[in-house]
Image: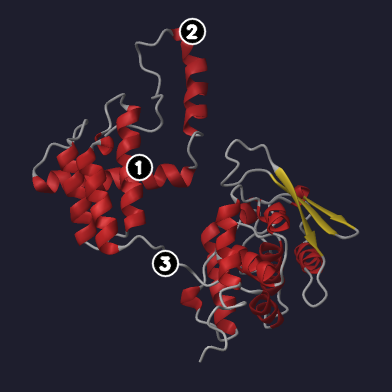
Amino acid sequence: MASLPAIREPRSSVPGKLGPDLETAVRYARAEKAPATRRAYETDHRLFVAWCEAKGIASNLPAAAETVAAFLAAEAEAGSRTSTLGRRLAAIRYFHKLAGLPTPTDAEAVKATLRGIRRSMGSAKARKAPALAEHVKAMVAASPDSLRGKRDRALVLLGFAGAFRRSELVALNVADIEEVELGLRILIRRSKTDQEGRGSVIGVTRGTVACPVSALREWLVAGEITAGPLFRPVNKANRPRNVRLTSRSVANIIKEMAQTVGLDASTFSGHSLRSGFLTSAASKGASIFKMMDVSRHRSVETLRGYVRDSDVFKDHAGSGLL
C-alpha cells in the first residue's frame, strides 16, 4: 500500500545534508490533508486491498479499472451509500497519484459504474434536522445549572449564533474571543473552506431570551478558564480538563439536549446548529449575503437550499385551490 503523504520518510540513499530539510518537508506534506481525511482515505484503501485479497486479486498498484468498477459494485450491493462510494474512489485515486501511477478512477468503465449506481440507488444525502431557534431556546432552558450544564448552554448557543461547524467550535481558544458592546468578535483560525488558515472574523450578537455572550461568560467564570481551549470535558471532580472537546462530543451534546426536550435525538447531529441558524435566519427574511457573513459559505447556491427549505410554503402556487 502506498504511504501518506506523497513525500515518504527519508531513505538511506538521500544525501545526509538533505535529511533535516526533507524531514521538515514530510511534516508539511502530511499537513496537506486534514487528519480526519487522511484516516478516512487510509481506511478506504485498506478496505479495497482487503476486498482484492479476498477475491484472490493482486492488490498492488496500479489497480485495473475493471477491478475498481467491480469493487464499487460489491460495495453498493453491501449497502454503502453513494457518497461513501465517492470517497472510496477519491482514496484509490489519491494513493495512485502518490505512487506516480495512472489513476484507474478516470476510466470510463469506473465512471459509468458509479453513474449507474447513483441512478439505481439515488444520491440524495440523508439530511439531519436543523436545530431551529425555538429548539435551541428550549434546549438551554432545560439544561441543568451544573458546570457541565453551563458548558453545554454556552456551546449550543455559540454554535447556533455563529453558524459553526463542530470542528470549528472545538478548535476555538479563549484568545479567539473578544467581547464588545454589541456581542462577540470571534476569530476562526481555520475551517473547511479555509484549509490554508488565512482566518476570518465573525460577529455573534447578544440575545434577549438566550444570550450566547452571557452563557459563554458564565461557563468561563465557573470553570476558571482564562486561556487555552474554550470548550473542554468536565471530569468526575467537576473541574474542566485542559484538553479540547472532540467533534463527536459536540454531536452527542446536541443529541442529549434534543432528547431532554422531547425531540427525536436520532434526527440531530453536529451540523444541526449550523443548519438551524441558516434555516431560522432565512425564515425571518435575513439577507442571504448577511447570512454568508456569518456562515462563511463561498457559494450563494449552497445557501439557497436553506432559503428554499424555509420558504417551501410561502406564496405557494396551490394555496386556496382546494
Question: Are discs 2 and 1 less than 8 Å apart at CB?
Answer: no
Q: Residue 212 falls in which quadrant of the image?
A: bottom right
The span from disc 3 to disc 2 (Cα, nearest Å) is 53 Å
Q: Identify the residue at image location x=48%, y=43%.
A: 35
Q: Can the viewer see residue 186?
A: yes
**Residue 38 % position (x, y):** 42, 42
Comes first in the chain, label 1 or label 3? 1
Q: Residue 7 falls in which quadrant of the image?
A: top left
Relative to the observer, which residue lies in front, 253 or 13? Answer: 253
Count of numbered circles on the image:
3
Comes first in the chain, label 2 or label 1? 2
The span from disc 1 to disc 3 (Cα, nearest Å) is 21 Å
Question: Are discs 1 and 3 less than 8 Å apart at CB?
Answer: no
74, above or below 8, in the image: below
Q: Amino acid at mark 2?
A: Lys
Q: Identify the residue at image location x=32%, y=60%.
A: 81
Tell me the crowding category of disc 3: few under 14, some 14 to 19, or many 20 or more residues within 10 angstroms, Cα based: few
**Residue 195 % position (x, y):** 57, 39
Comes first in the chain, label 3 or label 2? 2
The residue tagged 3 is 126
The span from disc 2 to disc 1 (Cα, nearest Å) is 36 Å
Q: Secondary structure at mark 2?
A: helix
**Residue 118 % position (x, y):** 29, 57
Relative to the observer, which residue lies in front, 197 or 306? Answer: 306
Q: Secondary structure at mark 3?
A: loop
The residue tagged 1 is 90
The residue tagged 2 is 17
Is 36 placed left or right of 193 in the picture? left
Q: Identify the residue at image location x=67%, y=82%.
A: 138
Q: Amino acid at mark 3?
A: Ala
* Viewer-side label of 3, 2: 3
